[in-house]
Amino acid sequence: MTDRAAQSLYGEELSPGALVGGYVVEDVRYRGAVATLYFAREARSGAPAALKVMRPQFATARGALRRFQQEAETLRRLRHPHIVDVLGQ
């Protein structure tokens, strides 16, 4: 599914039940200026997951996209019981 197709299907914010990359959205946990953080579950196992999605208007801004990717890469390297593991980008 293209980004535009997902945008038109889900709108600005993902709704509970939306399937995104193998994860099912349950609810919104935080709405930030650049991204929204969702509580989701892995579709196959039901394991809990955090799903962070950039707002569409920032997805093409190189600086915002680079910072978003750097954040994911930093989290991928950190190991601590109170920090989530990055499962995908």
Image (cartoon, rainbow, N blue to C red):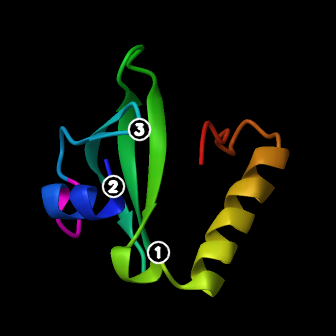
Direction from residue 82 to residue 50 in the image, left or right: left
86 versus 2 height, above or below: above
47 versus 78 height, above or below: above
Callout 2: 10 Å neighbours few (<14), some, many (20+)?
few
User: Which amino acid, mark 3?
Assistant: Gly
Give me the C-alpha separation between circle 3 and circle 1.
Answer: 17 Å
Element on which disc 3 rests: loop
Residue at x-position 45% and y-position 48%: 51
Residue 13 in percent (x, y) is at 23, 64
Residue 23, by quadrant, is top left
Callout 3: 10 Å neighbours few (<14), some, many (20+)?
few
Query: In this rendering, which labeled residue sits more in front, label 2 or label 3?
Result: 2
Magenta span: 10-14
User: Which amino acid, mark 2?
Assistant: Thr
Majority secondary structure of magenta residues: loop
Direction from residue 38 to residue 64 in the image, left or right: right
Residue at x-position 74% and y-position 52%: 75
Q: Which mark is residue 23?
A: none
Element on which disc 2 rests: loop
Choose the circle earlier in sequence order: 2 or 3. Answer: 2
> Please, which residue is most extreme toward the top here?
45
Residue 84 in percent (x, y) is at 64, 42
Residue at x-position 38% and y-position 73%: 55
Give me the C-alpha separation between circle 1 and circle 2.
Answer: 13 Å
Residue tagged 3: 21
Residue tagged 2: 2
Choose the circle earlier in sequence order: 3 or 1. Answer: 3
Residue tagged 1: 59
